[in-house]
Every structure is written in C-alpha cells, then in structure tokens.
Image (cartoon, rainbow, N blue to C red):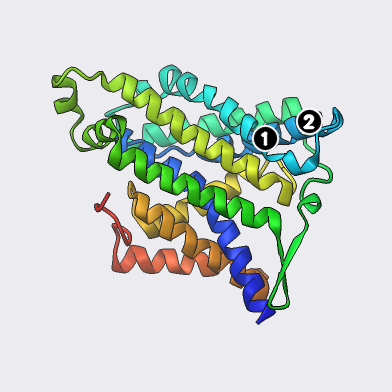
Amino acid sequence: MATLLNILSSGVFHASILFLVASGLQLVFGVQKVFNLACGSFYALGAYLGITFVDVFTGRGGPPLLAFIPLLAAGILLGALGPVVERGLLRFVYNRDESFQLLLTFSVVLMLEDVIRFFWGTYPRSPKGVYLAFGTLHVGGAAIPVYNLLVIAASLLVALLMGYLLEKTRFGKIIRATASNSEMVQALGIRSSVVYVKVFTLGTILGTVGGALVIPTTAAVSEMAVHLIVLAFAVVVIGGLGSMKGAFLGALLVGLLKSVSIAVYPELEMMLIYLIVIGVLVLRPQGLFGGAS
C-alpha cells in the first residue's frame, strides 16, 4: 500500500510539472502553428533563475516556507522573453515549412544553453534547505513530501484558470477564434500579431514557472532542457497536438509511467514511455484528443 501511494504521488507530481510545460507548448501550437522546441529552454531558465531568487530570498532572512514567492516571481519575470523571441524570431517563420520552425526554435535551445552556462556555469545547482523545510505527510505508511502536494495543487489551479481563460473570457474567445481562423479574426479588426505575442508570452510563463517550481526537488543541469523536450514530445504525441485536454491526460499518463518504471525497472524508463508513443502513432496518429481542442 505504501509503495503504491509513493508511486502515485510521485507520478502525479511529475505529471503536474509536465502539464505546465506541455500546456504552454499546446497553446502556442494551437494558435500559432509553431512546434516550439524552446519550451525546454524556458523550463531550464525558470529553474536556474528560481535558484538564484531563492538563494537571495533565504540569504536575506526569508523563511524557506515562503520560497514559493521567489520561485513564482522568477517564472513570471522570465515571461518577458516571450515578446522578444516571438517578435524577434518566430514571426519570420509563420506560414513557412515546419522544418524552418523546428530549426529556428532548436537554435534558440542551443543559444539559451550557452546563456545558462555563461551565467550559472556547468556544475549542477540546487536551492538549499527549501524542499525539506516543507516536511512530509504520512498517509497509509507512505511518506509524501508536502512540497510535492503544493506543486500538484498549483498545477490543478493553473489548469482551472486556463480552462476559465479559454472558455469564459473575451481574450479566450479571441484565442480560440484565432486558432480556428486567423484571417477571419483579422477581418474583424483584431490584430493577430498582438494575439500571437500574448499567447507566446503565456506559453513561455507556463514553461518557466514549471521549471521554477520543480527545482527544489532536483538539481538544475544545463542538459535539463533537452530531457524535458523529450518528455514533452511524448505528452504531445499521446494527448494530441494542440489539445489542452490531451496535454492534461498525456502528462498524467507519462508522469505515472515514469514513476512506475523508476520504481520497478529504472533502466526502462524512457523505453516504456516511447513504446506507448509508438502505439499511439500507429493506432491513432492524431493522439487521444487530437483535433478536439
């Protein structure tokens, strides 16, 4: 029982982080039709800047139990990269072949890796004394870190807010209309370029906040962007490209598979996930929720 609870809690925690990043990826693709590989670099930048903010916060006497504040601040602040990347680079490859978009966003990945090495070096880094400060909750013989539960709650809140934004607000209706027919939206007097900037900034913040929130549980390394892209790709393929429901369920499935494989056969972690990806590509190429967003 304790082992099962530990696997479930760990899997849902991994899924929560994956959902934040994958939802940003799905949102950008759904509206701008760009598969943004740089989402992994935004995630890594959020992690590194989160460490810096937490170290400054605790170094000046801030209690570790309030570390969520500097972590979220780091993630939201990095949203400023969104307009820079979108206006400075992406707008030149809209309506061009997907290979241009992939090459461009992959070049952003490589450039941001160098930025990380320049500012933070190549050694693994992690914030000190934050994760353990939250303590553990004992349920059914399992010890579940309270910090993990807070991150899961934060991700569920983000999912609810995203649903409200897309379904109930005027901006959400504009996003959905632009995703459906951008030319018609422009004919109604709405500048699609402004919508693109806002959507890409929102997608960037989801990635950077995901990276900032995960960092108390692990060490930041310069290669973490590529590892995240691989997992996010699995989430997108399983859930369906452009589907927010797919991002939610795909992240949950990948997170649980990752947790189970680590507990049973850690050597087969990625193989198990990509066997599912291959199965989806063969049986349902559009993903479980592809085309339903």
**Residue shown at the point (36%, 36%) measured from the top left:** 34
On the image, the x and y values in percent for residue 105 come to 47, 32
Q: Label 2 is placed on what type of residue?
A: Phe
59 shown above or below 253: above
Q: CA distance from mark 2 to mark 1?
A: 9 Å
Position of 255 compared to 56: left or right? left
Q: Label 1 is placed on what type of residue?
A: Ile
On the image, the x and y values in percent for residue 10 come to 63, 64
Q: Are marks 2 and 1 in contact (CB under 8 Å)?
A: yes
Residue hosting label 1: 69
66 shown above or below 83: below
Which of the two labelled residues, at mark 2 and mark 1, occupies the earlier sequence position?
Answer: 2
Residue 160 visible: yes
88 shown above or below 291: above
Q: In the orientation shown, which residue stands out farthest toward the bottom?
A: 1
Residue 268 visible: no
Label 1 crowding class (10 Å Cα cut-off): few <14, some 14-19, many 20+? some
Would you identify the image quadrant in which residue 238 lies? bottom left
Label 2 crowding class (10 Å Cα cut-off): few <14, some 14-19, many 20+? some
Residue hosting label 2: 57
On the image, the x and y values in percent for residue 149 come to 63, 57
**Residue shown at the point (21%, 29%) measured from the top left:** 182
On the image, the x and y values in percent for residue 217 come to 72, 51
Would you identify the image quadrant in which residue 24 lies? top left
Quadrant location, the N terminus: bottom right
